[in-house]
Amino acid sequence: MHAIRPEEVSFTAIRAQGAGGQNVNKVSSAVHLRFDIAASSLPAAVKERLMALGDQRITEAGVVVIKAQQHRSQDMNRAEALQRLQELVDRAAHVPRTRRPTRPTRGSQIRRVDEKTRRGQVKALRGRGPTGD
C-alpha cells in the first residue's frame, strides 16, 4: 500500500448537483479532488499501471479527477474523495501474477478425443431414415 501525500492532492469546493433543499444554493459542499500521477511520489511501476487502468476518472494528461458529493459536510466529502483515490492507487499497486502456460495432461487429452469421437458417432446416426435419405 502506497500512502498518498496530502501536498500532492488539490481540492476544489464546488456546489453539489441534484436536489438539496433550502441549503443547496448557499453551501459549496461537493469536492473535486485532483491528483497528478506524473508529478506524484509513487513508484514508477505503480504510475504506469495507474495510467494503464483505463479508468474514466483519469484524464489524457494523467490527472485523476474525483468528484465527491455524497455528504452534506465538505470535510466528509473530502475524506471520501481521498479514500476513493487511495482505493484506485491500491488497485494499481497490486502486481498481477504472471501466468505460466501449462500443458494438458495425457488423461485430459484422451478424454477430449474420446468425447469428440462419441459426438461424431451421434451426429453420424442422425437424419438417416428407413428410406436412406
Image: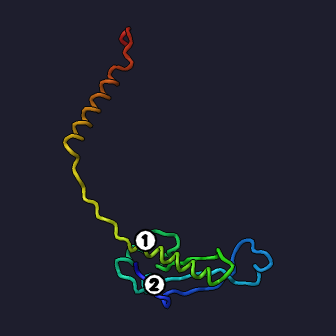
Look at mark 1 in the image and give the residue it sits on.
91
- The picture places residue 10, in percent across and down from the top left corner, at 54, 87
Look at mark 2 in the image and give the residue it sits on.
4
Q: Which of 47 and 21 is in front in this view?
A: 21
Report the amino acid beneath label 2.
Answer: Ile
Task: State the separation of the CA atoms marked 1 and 2.
Answer: 14 Å
- The picture places residue 53, in percent across and down from the top left corner, at 43, 69
Residue drawn at x 22%, y 37% as measured from the top left: 110
The image shows residue 40, relative to residue 58, as above or below, that is below
The image shows residue 123, relative to residue 94, as above or below, that is above
Report the amino acid beneath label 1.
Answer: Arg
The figure's colour scheme reads rainbow
Q: In which quarter of the image is the N terminus?
A: bottom left
Query: Mark 1 falls on what kind of element?
Result: helix
Residue drawn at x 29%, y 64% as measured from the top left: 98
Q: Which residue lies furthest to the bottom in this view?
A: 7
Q: Determine whether label 1 and label 2 are within 8 Å by CB.
A: no
Q: Residue furthest top?
A: 131
Residue drawn at x 69%, y 84% as measured from the top left: 28
For this view, does 12 lie left or right of residue 121? right
Nearer-N-terminus badge (1/2): 2
Query: Mark 2 falls on what kind of element?
Result: loop
Q: Which of 131 and 23 is in front in this view?
A: 23
Q: Nearer the viewer, residue 19 or 76?
A: 76
The image shows residue 31, relative to residue 94, as above or below, that is below
Q: Residue furthest right?
A: 22
- The picture places residue 83, in percent across and down from the top left corner, at 52, 77
Q: Quadrant of the C terminus?
A: top left
